[in-house]
Amino acid sequence: MVDVRSLLGSLASTRTVTDAVDMGEVILGDQDYLFLEPVVFEVTLTNTGGGIVADGTARAQVRTQCVRCLCDFSVGLVAPVEGFYVMPGREEEVPPEQEFGLIVDGVRVDLEPAIRQAAILELPFAPLHDAECLGICPVCGTDRNVDPCDCPPQTVPTPFSALEGLVAPEQEG
Ligand SMILES: [Zn+2]
Ligand SMILES: [Zn+2]
C-alpha cells in the first residue's frame, strides 16, 4: 500500500515507488512458472485530476519448463505496469472501457494487483530454453540437444496415406 496523500493536494504531482511483490508459483494450463525471487518494480504515480495514474516496470526471474525438451530453465521478464486509481464515490466519472482500482480509504493505493497482472501477462506462453531447442526424439525418447540420435524423421500418418498404393499412375496421352 502506498500512501498518496502528498499527491492528492496538487495536480500533476508525481511520486516514484520502488518495492517488491512475492509471487511464488503460477500455473497456467499445463505450464508452471516459479518466481525465483520477489517481483521488483519501479512505478511512478501521477495525480491527473481524475485520479492517480501508475506507470512503470516490473522485473522478475522465473523458472519454467521448455515445451520441447522439458528441461527446467530460468528466464528474465520485464513487464510494463499500468494502473489507474480513483477516489471512492467518483467511479462513475471513469470511462466504461477504462480499468481502474479504488484509492483505499481515499488515501492509499494498492499496487500489488497491477504488479501481479503485469508479471502474469509477460509469462512466455510456450517457453523454449533455446530458440533452437531440438526437443525429445519421439522414437527413442532421447534429448536430442544432448545426444543427436539416428532415428528417421517421423512422418505423421494421414487418412490418405493408406490410399496411396491404390491410385494408379496417370497415363499420358
Ligand atoms: Zn528445450
Ligand atoms: Zn531417436
Image (tube, rainbow, N blue to C red):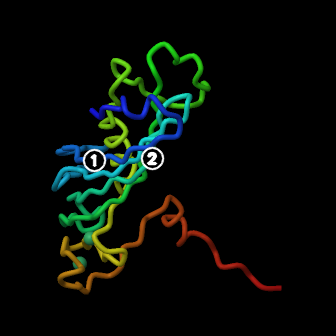
What is the three-letter code of the residue carrying label 2?
Asp
Distance of mark 2 from mark 1, alpha carbons? 31 Å
Residue 148 in the image: above or below residue 142 = below
Query: Does residue 78 lie above or below 152 as drawn?
Result: above
Q: Is residue 2 left or right of residue 82?
A: left
Circle 2 — which element? strand
Q: Residue at x 50, y 31 (%)?
A: 99
Mark number, residue 55: 2
Q: Which mark is residue 77?
A: none
- Percent position (x, y) of residue 160? 54, 62
Q: Residue furthest top?
A: 89
Q: In this picture, is 81 found above or below 77?
A: above
For the N terminus, give its image quadrant: top left
Residue that badge 1 annotates? 30
Q: Quadrant of residue 140?
A: bottom left
Q: Secondary structure at mark 1?
A: loop
Residue type beneath disc 1:
Asp
> Which of label 2 and label 1 is nearer to you?
2
How many numbered discs? 2
Q: Residue at x 41, y 72 (%)?
A: 155
User: Residue 25: in sight, yes or no?
Assistant: yes
Q: Earlier in the sequence, mark 2 or mark 1?
A: 1
Please name the residue shown 61% across and 71% down the image: 167
Q: Is residue 138 visible?
A: no
Q: Quadrant of ligand 2?
A: bottom left
Q: Position of residue 95 (x, y in %)?
A: 61, 26
Residue drawn at the location 30% of the way across and 51% of the way down: 41
Q: Is mark 2 within 8 Å of ligand 1?
A: no
Specify whether 170 is left or right of 86.
Answer: right
In this rendered view, identify the residue nearer to me: 162 or 102.
102
